[in-house]
Image: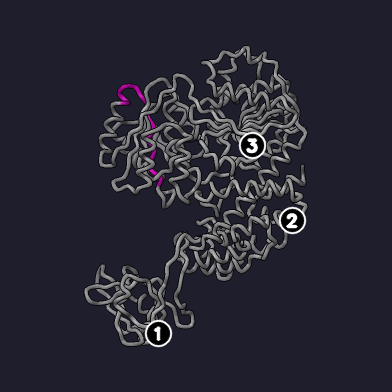
Amino acid sequence: MRPDILNPLFAEVTALKGVGPQLAKPLERLGLSRVVDVAFHLPTGFIDRVARDELDMADAGRTIAITLTAVDYRSSNGRGPSRVRAVDAKGNYVSLLYFGGHPGWAKKLLPTGEQRRVSGKLEMYGDELQMVHPDYVLPMEEAEPGGREAIYPLSEGMTSRRMGQLTAQAVERAPDLPEWIEPGLLAKHGWPGWREALARVHADPADTVARTRLAYDELFANQLALMLVRQSSRGRRGRALAGDGRLRDMLRLPYQLTGAQARTVREIEGDLEQAQPMLRLLQGDVGAGKTLVAALAMLVAVEAGAQAALLAPTEILARQHYESLRKLFAGLPVEIAVLTGRDKGRPREATLMGLADGSINILIGTHAIFQEAVAYKDLGLVVVDEQHRFGVAQRMMLQAKAQTAPHLLAMTATPIPRTLTLANYGEMDVSRLDEMPPGRQPIETRVISQDRLSDVVDALGRHLSDGGQAYWVCPLVEESAKSDLAAAEDRAATLQARFGERIGLVHGRMKGPEKDAVMAAFSSGALSVLVATTVIEVGVDVPNATLIVIEHADRFGLAQLHQLRGRVGRGTGKSNCLLVRSGALGETARARLALMRETNDGFRIAEEDLKLRGSGELLGTRQSGEEGFRLVDPEMLGELLPVAHDDARLLIDRDGGLDGPRGTAARLALYLFERDAGVALLRSG
């Protein structure tokens, strides 16, 4: 239960004055559904509004706040602007211009002869002063003096000024909380209390001391939660799983294990032999052979008389894992089953019975494998694929399925910089597969300008006439998902006009079975080109596809580009990746594309991505299931994370954990930053 002192912050956003259903919509689009979300919606910059009593040509180029009186109006016919002539207290003139909209609107905003407080950027037009689309025009009783004003990330229907009023209310509702930071550390950095820091950042976005304090708080709560999770998992009773090698000896592997795979298998075997449950994260670049390592781990569990479960993020991936493991284990006395939300009726019942009586050794599936109805006879090992799609809470839910705590192996193909590994997986031991299996071809990457799109289509034609298959990824359109879809549909239509019915389309709005059918047609070779939005599933495996075209590649993050590129290079043929870029490139986009051309090493790309990205989302788009950071910029991460890690360790080892005075305050931090899975675990575990 969340402590009562935090309830005002966790109220619905409609608890704020002036927020009704109408205003709740643009807030919802920004992900702000509760008061705490508004409080943590930090400004990204500021405007200095210079307060003036009279107009002065020397202020041209500045944003000013001034009292004006409208004198007359001119609205031009057709497309021209509506013009309001206004004077200051000394009789100096300025023209206020409004483009678009109804001409009567300006008259309503600035009635003649009435004073209004007006703010906007003052400009010279010839030898006259003008202001285009003032930022605000207020009646004198609502007048604002000027000064520094925060700029916020906004959605349609919101202004920075309105957002500032809402954040002020949200901060007003924030309680004073006891201090959770170690006193010596607090003094060293000169940090204010957390509530004062929150108020300061909204008042002055350039206050780096206050901003750093808030980022530190979030990282501290994160590290403390991970340590508590680890402590709880390590403290739970597990069981040793020592395999005798009989099943692995029967296995006919397609190739020798790489050095990295052999090393990782030994680490996992060592973990499984302990009674303490394994908590290991397996990082491997696209195609480094994680699935084979996981398969060997599952065989160890079966040899030791236990069951294993493999959890995949999507239905397509679950079925793909099922098919590849069936092939790999052909001829072995191992019973494998698959279970997804789509499995109904008798087949589902048979699977559930097989799990309960132990006749099924390995289960592969989506979230469906940890629903209430699914009971295992003896679950000894859980493997989670694409770890970043599952939060700590979901990892725990699956582990609760066993009488004793099962061993957990989590896998991710998203190379994660070392600082982020600590931030998101601090409770885990980490193995890295940093070698490629023999026969994997490096992918040749080229950057091509949008102007040469017709050449790209010609190259695609030659590729198809040689019997090849290709992916064509459509741009990430910032404004809305609808535009992403429209871009993909248009591209599919133009390619169909040229190449006929061999073109398929997948996008996020398709229903599961429909998407599966298109994917299956592409896998079987019935379709030659798969046009897709960025929904192409991580891990989709079509060895014959050796070309991928990514349109507007400059709009994607490095991690995402690298993931998409990994769809090819899965067979023995030479693979190519064409990054189609826009005309004008920013410096960051140029650096990203140059790095993609230069290297196929996902770990290097991940480290560079963190440096280049600045304060954008970490790891491409924010991943569902895993809590993102709201107050932490990547540039702060490297510096603050080790400090937060050590401070959390100090709290647990020296300051009495959550039961001492500092621990009571830290408990509030866990709830405030929604890392309270840690608290719940201590209660249950």
What residue sits right under mark 2 in the picture?
664
What residue sits right under mark 1 in the picture?
115
The C terminus: image quadrant: top right
* Residue 493 place in picture, x, y as percent: 33, 38
**Label 2 Cα crowd, 10 Å radius (few <14 / some 14-19 / many 20+):** some
Q: Which quadrant of the structure image shows residue 300?
A: top right
Horizontal arrangement in the rendering, residue 677 relative to residue 36 (left or right):
right
Q: Which quadrant of the structure image shows residue 347?
A: top right
**Is-magenta flag for residue 233?**
no
The answer to whether residue 579 is seen in the rendering is yes
**Is-magenta flag for residue 464?**
yes
Amino acid tagged 3? Met
The answer for how far apart the CA atoms under marks 2 and 1 are is: 54 Å
What residue sits right under mark 3 in the picture?
428
Amino acid tagged 1? Gln
User: Where is 15 relative to 427, above or below?
Assistant: below
Ranked by sequence position, the earlier of labels 2 and 1 is 1
Between label 3 and label 1, give the one nearer the viewer: 3
**What's the magenta region?**
463-476
Q: Residue at x 25, y 77 (%)?
A: 128
Residue 572: which disc?
Answer: none
* Residue 246 place in picture, x, y as percent: 67, 13
* Residue 468 place in picture, x, y as percent: 35, 24
Q: Residue at x 50, y 25 (%)?
A: 435
Ranked by sequence position, the earlier of labels 2 and 3 is 3
Q: Residue at x 63, y 15 (%)?
A: 248
User: At numbered mark 3, what does the secondary structure look like: helix, strand or loop?
Assistant: loop
User: At numbered mark 1, what does the secondary structure look like: helix, strand or loop?
Assistant: strand
The answer to whether residue 34 is seen in the rendering is no
